[in-house]
Image (cartoon, rainbow, N blue to C red):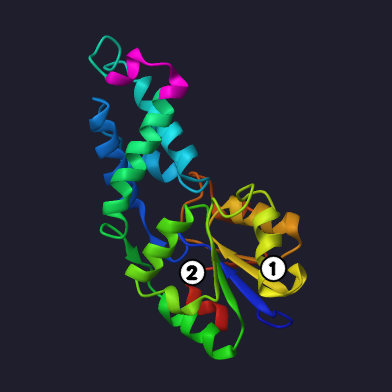
């Protein structure tokens, strides 16, 4: 798999760390602030991967449309939608700052895979749609920060995955050509960005992909574990 590969870019949420618990807790604190009912894990799992703004907006709009919310004292019902979106994002980021990493776990095989990649001498970057400050903190909390020479978040560039720009900019930072830079991710966002950038892509089978089968996303390899990168 690593033949002709000169660098590796790895996604974070759903690829290295199962952060669904963090998302659910932070979102439910946010919804409670707005006097809205809590969200179920299924909706959160289908909504993650496109950045905090998309996640908060999707969950908020879903909860506002619930029949039991109509006629309630929910704060969000009396405000313009864009204003309540902005407030919800602010409250979510406030809560996430304190929750980050507390309800999440590193997936099996991740440390083994990263250690193996490090031993090859290939430079590695972490590229995620999570805000950079949260990504850096999570990597440090989980002991994964030492594997990456570069870390980029959803606010590091003008656009997020599935746009190819973040991958192209990350390849520039690594000093490698896209065709020789492997993207490792868990969703169609990673797959579409990699294809558009000209990077080969390996997708893990256990992450978040908006409820769709990961095998249907464009890929060169499917992995049950990051440890398989060395096979």
Residue in the image at 67% along x and 49% along y = 163
Mark 2 or 1: the one toward you: 1
Going by the image, does 208 lie left or right of 171? left
| Magenta stretch, overall SS | helix
How many residues crowd mark 2 within 10 Å: few (<14), some (14–19), many (20+)? Answer: some
Give the number of the disc on residue 37.
none
Q: Position of residue 217 (x, y in %)?
A: 63, 53
Q: Nearer the viewer, residue 145 or 163?
A: 145
Whether residue 230 is situated above or below residue 125 in the rendered picture: below
Residue in the image at 73% along x and 74% along y = 176
Element type at marker 1?
helix
Q: Which badge, 2 or 1, comes first in the chain's sequence?
A: 1
Q: Position of residue 205 (x, y in %)?
A: 50, 61
Residue stretch in magenta: 75-83
Whether residue 79 is situated above or below residue 113 in the rendered picture: above
Viewer can see residue 99 = yes
Give the number of the disc on residue 171.
1
Question: Residue 17, located in which quarter of the rendered image?
Answer: bottom left
Residue in the image at 74% along x and 81% along y = 4
Residue in the image at 28% along x and 32% along y = 31
Q: CA distance from mark 2 to mark 1?
A: 25 Å
Q: Position of residue 199 (x, y in %)?
A: 72, 65
Give the number of the disc on residue 224.
2
Quadrant where the N terminus sits is: bottom right
Going by the image, does 53 lie left or right of 184? left
Q: Extreme top residue here?
A: 71
Q: Position of residue 39 (x, y in %)?
A: 30, 35
Magenta span contains residue 79 = yes
């Amino acid at each position: 798999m690593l033949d002709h590969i000169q660098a590796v870019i790895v996604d974070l949420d759903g690829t290295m760390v199962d952060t669904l618990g963090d998302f659910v807790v932070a979102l439910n604190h946010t919804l409670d602030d707005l006097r809205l009912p809590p969200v179920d894990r299924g909706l959160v799992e289908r909504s993650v991967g496109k950045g905090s703004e998309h996640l908060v907006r999707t969950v908020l709009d879903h909860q506002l449309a619930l029949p039991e919310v109509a006629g309630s004292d929910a704060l969000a019902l009396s405000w313009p939608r864009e204003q309540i979106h902005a407030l919800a994002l602010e409250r979510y980021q406030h809560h996430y700052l304190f929750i980050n990493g507390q309800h999440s776990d590193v997936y099996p095989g991740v440390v083994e895979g990263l250690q193996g990649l490090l031993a090859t001498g290939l430079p590695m970057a972490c590229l995620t749609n999570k805000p950079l400050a949260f990504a850096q903190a999570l990597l440090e909390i989980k002991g994964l920060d030492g594997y990456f020479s570069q870390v980029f978040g959803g606010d590091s560039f003008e656009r997020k995955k599935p746009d190819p720009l973040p991958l192209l900019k990350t390849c520039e930072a690594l000093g490698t050509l896209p065709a020789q830079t492997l993207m490792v991710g868990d969703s169609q966002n990673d797959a579409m960005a990699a294809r558009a950038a000209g990077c080969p892509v390996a997708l893990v089978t256990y992450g978040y992909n908006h409820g769709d089968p990961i095998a249907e996303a464009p890929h060169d390899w499917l992995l049950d574990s990051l440890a398989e990168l060395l096979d």
